[in-house]
Structures are given as C-alpha cells and as structure tokens.
Amino acid sequence: MTAPTISRPGRRPDRRRLTVRQYTVRTLGGVATLIFVSPFLYAISTSLRPAQDVAEHAVAFPTSITFSNFSRVYSEINYGRSVFNTLLITAGTCAIVVLLGSMAGYALGRTSRSWSTWVYRGFMAGMAVPLFVLVAPLYLLVRDLGLLGSIPGVILIYAASNLPIAIFFYTSFVRSIPGDLDEAAQLDGASRLRTFFSIFFPLLGPVTATLLLFITLAVWNDLLVPLVFLQNADQRTIMVNAYALLDPKIAQPTDLFPSALMGVAPLLLLFVFFQRRMVEGMSGGAVKG
C-alpha cells in the first residue's frame, strides 16, 4: 500500500510573491519601453501636425492630421535618390569589408608566426584612430586618385575605416574553430582558398551578421564622410540631405522630424525583414565564443 504524500508548508511555492514579482517586472518593463519610444512618438505626432498648430502648442496631441510635411520633405531632399545612394554605399561597404575582413581574419587566425601577431596588432591600432582625424589626408589622397566626389571613393573610405573591427571579429572567431577542419581539408586535397570558401566562410555566419549590423548602423547614420567627399547633390546620402534642411538660425520641427523619420524608415524596414537572421547570428556568436 502506497504511503500518503505529506506536503510540507515550508516548501510550497509562494504564488502570491511570484505573481507580484512578475507584475512588478512587467510594469517596470512597460514604463521603460514607454520612456524609450516617447521621443519617437513625439516625432510622429509633430510630423503629422500643421506648422501653425506646432507654433502655438509645441507639445500637444494633433487636432488635425496632415501629410503635407512628409510630401514637402520628400521632394526637398530628393528622397528616392538619397535612399538609393545610401543603400548603394552601405551595400558596397559591407561587401568589401566582409570579403576582405574574413579572408584576413582567416589568414591571421590560422598563422602562428611572429609577423602575424604584429600585423594583427597593427590592425587593432587602426581601431583607436577616429575617422575625423584622417579627413584632411584622406581628402588629398582621394583627390589625387581621382575619386573625389564619387560614390566608389566614399565606399573605399568606409571599407578602410571598418576593416580593423572586421579583422578583430573574424580573427577571434577563427581562432576558436578547431584545427581538425584544416587537416581534413588538406587530406582531401583542398587548397587554402577552397578550404576558406567551402568550410570556414559558412561557419562565419554568426559573426558576419553581427558585423553587418554594426557597419550598417555606422554607415547609414554617418554625416561626415558624405558631406565632405560627395560634392554633387545627386550623389548625397539621406542624412546629408536631411541635414541640409536645418536652418542655422531656427529649427523647424515640421521639417526636422519628418526628415528624420523618413531617413530612419528604410533602416527600420531592413531590420524588420532581417531581424530573425541577425538575432540568430548574434546568439550563435555568443554561444560560440
């Protein structure tokens, strides 16, 4: 006969305390989320209000909704062309940085000679130099190369400035991969180049996703490089054209907020479509490390 189970009051879960804890966490999370999105909501609200309404009441709910602010800013900043230029520069930078950075990271991560350590340290030293410090010599170099005022010149500048961080990411990741893969590939007669593209490059997916997120944010939101190196208005990025709307004497919220929202909108759409892949990549990189 089975003995009756005796419950011990001291080991019962405190459901009331657990519920209160969950309620507190959710409340704090909701408040933090509201604080985080409140500037974004204010920007949307102001963008949908007429200029006269904003001038009378700077902080208020819209009494009437208008889309004339967005349509005016759309035409003034040449929105379609600006987004295309920004996407082209961002895509070109990402492609060059991922290709060259992954190959350099593979070579440095699989080489145990002394010179590889000094080369790696040289790239790491490049991470400590801000880009604005190099604007003057870069301007002269790009001018002498005949790339001043061209999108390829800007792509090369962004690629060179982001290569050190890419090499840092890839070298650290490659060093954590067991060397048995190289030995197995050599036994099968694969060359170094084929070993990299067939075996190692697919394994670099997690760190590549993290790196692409970092580069996209840096290039898309940058104002210095396209403002200095792109002289033609048809080649400027969305941030430069949005900055051109700012009056040095007075700021118009009905111009500032719509241009900022329209500038961030393509970036948000990219993150929405590729959110799952980016999260998986960053999680995979964290587990691998």
Image: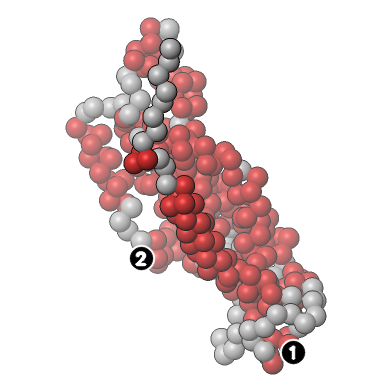
From where the camera sits, is residue 236 visible?
no
In the rendered structure, which disc, 2 or 1, sits on the residue that comes first in sequence? 1
Residue bearing the label numbered 1: 52
Q: Quadrant of the C terminus?
A: top left
Measured from the top left, where is residue 278 in percent x and y? 54, 42
Q: Is residue 49 left or right of residue 87?
A: right
> Given the image, on which type of amino acid does mark 2 rest?
Val
What colouring does the structure picture have?
Answer: secondary structure
Give the residue displayed 21% in from the left and 28% down from the top: 113
Which structural element holds mark 2?
helix
| Labels 2, 1: front one | 1
Measured from the top left, where is residue 286 in percent x and y? 40, 38
Work out how far the residue at label 2 is from the one at label 1, CA to CA, in angstroms.
Answer: 43 Å
Front-lying residue, 71 or 47: 47
Residue 133 marker: 2
In the image, is residue 9 above or below residue 25? above
Which structural element holds mark 1?
helix
Q: Quadrant of the N terminus?
A: top left
> Given the image, on which type of amino acid does mark 1 rest?
Gln
